[in-house]
């Protein structure tokens, strides 16, 4: 009911104000609900517009692949993923092998191994690679070889190599010519020049 209608009924200004205030108080929750409903409707409309835009963009993207062989593309993607996984596994294996070989070399050096290749050939490589405690198990395996009768000769201090050449009498020549080891440079020069005087 409008203010004019109340005035026609003969109500005073104070009475009309009271009625209007009561009416406004009663309508406040209704107005709040109405405002919320409008806001929700606006949000829903905005969402629909955004979804329409997304659908249009997706349709454009799909149109690009309209003539493509989708199953072929899927296979290419699967092959690429498999290739990447294989290369990653191969790389990890290479790193693991390198670390394992370093452990074996270090253990052989520590045990004063004379021939790393021969010692490595006697180890159960695959078993040691599968070990969870590679360092300890490699050390144990090397220690066992140092104590075994048929392999202990592969360990120990290396004998110093003789520099020079033995002659038929058994003397060691420092020149490698089979001459006398006690021969000096001076005696060699004397002999050389004495031959030149003859």
Image: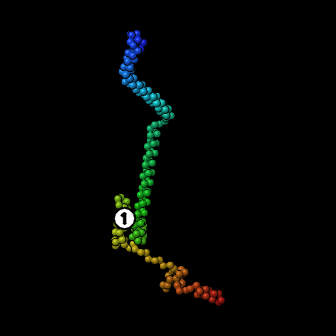
Q: Nearer the viewer, residue 109 or 27?
A: 27
The image quadrant of residue 19 is top left
Q: Position of residue 69 (x, y in %)?
A: 47, 36
- Rendered residue at 43%/75% (across/down): 158
Q: Position of residue 137 (x, y in %)?
A: 35, 63
Q: Nearer the viewer, residue 32 or 112?
A: 32
What residue is pinned by disc 1?
Answer: 138
On the question of residue 165 being in view, the answer is yes
- Rendered residue at 63%/89% (across/down): 194
Taking the image as shown, residue 170 lies to the left or right of residue 124, namely: right
**Which quarter shows the C terminus?**
bottom right
Q: Is residue 53 above or below residue 119?
A: above
Taking the image as shown, residue 186 lies to the left or right of residue 100, namely: right
Q: Secondary structure at mark 1?
A: helix
Q: Is residue 64 above or below residue 163?
A: above
Q: Nearer the viewer, residue 125 or 13?
A: 13
């Amino acid at each position: 009911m409008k203010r004019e209608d109340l005035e026609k009924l003969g109500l005073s200004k104070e009475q009309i104000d009271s009625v209007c205030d009561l009416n406004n108080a009663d309508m406040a929750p209704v107005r709040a609900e109405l405002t919320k409903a409008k806001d929700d409707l606006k949000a829903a409309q905005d969402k629909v517009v955004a979804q329409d835009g997304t659908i249009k963009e997706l349709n454009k993207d799909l149109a690009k692949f309209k003539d493509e062989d989708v199953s072929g593309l899927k296979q290419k993607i699967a092959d690429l993923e498999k290739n990447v996984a294989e290369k990653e596994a191969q790389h990890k294996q290479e790193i693991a092998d390198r670390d394992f070989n370093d452990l074996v070399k270090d253990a052989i050096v520590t045990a004063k191994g004379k021939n790393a290749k021969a010692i490595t050939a006697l180890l159960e490589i695959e078993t040691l690679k599968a070990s969870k405690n590679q360092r300890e198990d490699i050390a144990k395996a090397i220690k066992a070889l140092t104590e075994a009768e048929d392999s202990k000769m592969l360990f120990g201090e290396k004998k110093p190599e003789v520099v020079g050449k033995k002659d038929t009498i058994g003397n060691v020549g420092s020149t490698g010519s089979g001459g006398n080891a006690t021969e000096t440079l001076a005696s060699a020069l004397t002999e050389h020049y004495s031959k030149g005087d003859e």
